Amino acid sequence: MNVRLIMSFEKLAAWAGLVLFAAGAGWGWTGREQLAQLRAISETVALSGESFRPAPHVASEASVAAWRKPGAQRGGPGWVYELFTPPDIYYDTVARAFDVVPPAVEAEGALPFGLELLEVKRAPYRLQLVGYFGSADDYTGTFSSPQLPGALLARAGSRFTELGLVLKSFSVGLVPVGPGEDGALFERTASAVLEDLTTGELVTLDSRGRKLTDMPLAVLRLKGGATKPRELREGDSVQDGQASYRVERIQFDPPEVVVLRTLPDRPRTEARVLRLASSEAGAKEERSKNPSDAPAQRRSETNLVSADKEH
């Protein structure tokens, strides 16, 4: 048995060797032309006999771009932030506002400010419900907006594209307004539910009154002219000749407004706190009773919030 296995293995090895020999012979026959081409290539490098001459270097004419000067921020011409040099920032304790120049000690009334505060109120919503008409099953609401001209008619499902609102529902019903001689008194009132397309917030309008927001609104008037009062929000500006006024902050209680004034012939932005005439009269009376609490002294008590500066 073992002798047969040995003989079979020898035959298999012989056949395998024969196959490898035939494959090698075939490869050598088919590649004879390529081998002849390789042997014919000369290994000698032909030199021209000339010395090496490096190619001349041509300098590129690249233009050097200068950085643009930093622009002023909305706070005024002094609010300029360079790359490594931010401005020095100061805090005015009287105006309760930041500035880029130290607050000056000024006598009260020395510099007329040119702007007076008439009222601080809540800003109205951008759409108001004025009324309605139609039958019980087919009411149409009448709306108004300071951003759109004329009366706006709408039903449930209507869109106010310019205002980013959609009218979700509109209804008319009786609302109790108080007790009467024969019982409770009711008033027929229209109600509109709006959806803000940006925030998804639902807002309800009532035909009995204007819808107000929590945004403060300052009613200001320029002094020394027959100008109409203007309603300004925080960040709004008004121009009076060369003077520019910007509303920095509005407060409800007590009603006051921080205004920044910029003049072309003055190096600093001036901050003032405007109050109602009645509130200002009470403040003056209180200061006359307590001279040590004068605005000039309180103005001088400022905190420096100086940023690190590269020199």
Image (cartoon, helix red, strand yellow):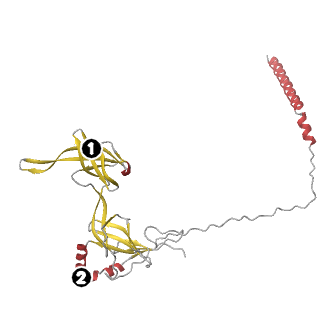
Relative vertical location of residue 281 with respect to residue 201 in this rendering, above or below: below
Q: Quadrant of the N terminus?
A: top right
Residue to which mark 1 is pinned: 140
- The image quarter containing residue 123 is bottom left
Relative vertical location of residue 35 with respect to residue 45 in this rendering, above or below: above
Q: How many angstroms separate mark 2 from mark 1 (CA)?
A: 60 Å
Residue 2's tag is none
Q: Quadrant of the C terminus?
A: bottom right
**Residue 94 versus residue 120: which sits nearer the camera?**
120
**Residue 18 versus residue 129: which sits nearer the camera?**
129
Measuring from the top left, give residue 288's x and y in whole percent. 24, 82
Q: Secondary structure at mark 2?
A: helix
Frontmost of labels 2 and 1 is 1
Measuring from the top left, give residue 272's x and y in whole percent. 34, 74
- The image quarter containing residue 236 is bottom left
Give the residue type that dot 2 points to: Ser
Residue 288's tag is 2
Measuring from the top left, give residue 16's x and y in whole percent. 83, 25
Q: Secondary structure at mark 1?
A: strand
Label 2 with label 1: CB-CB less than 8 Å: no
Measuring from the top left, give residue 74's x and y in whole percent. 44, 67
Give the residue type that dot 1 points to: Thr
Q: Count neighbours of disc 2 (C-alpha within 10 A) and say few if under 14, some if 14 to 19, many if 20 or more.
A: few
Relative horizontal placement of residue 32, taking residue 301 as reference (left or right): right
Which numbered disc flags the more N-terminal residue, 2 or 1? 1
**Residue 200 versus residue 19: which sits nearer the camera?**
200
- The image quarter containing residue 96 is bottom left
Relative vertical location of residue 184 with respect to residue 281 in this rendering, above or below: above
**Residue 305 versus residue 204: which sits nearer the camera?**
204
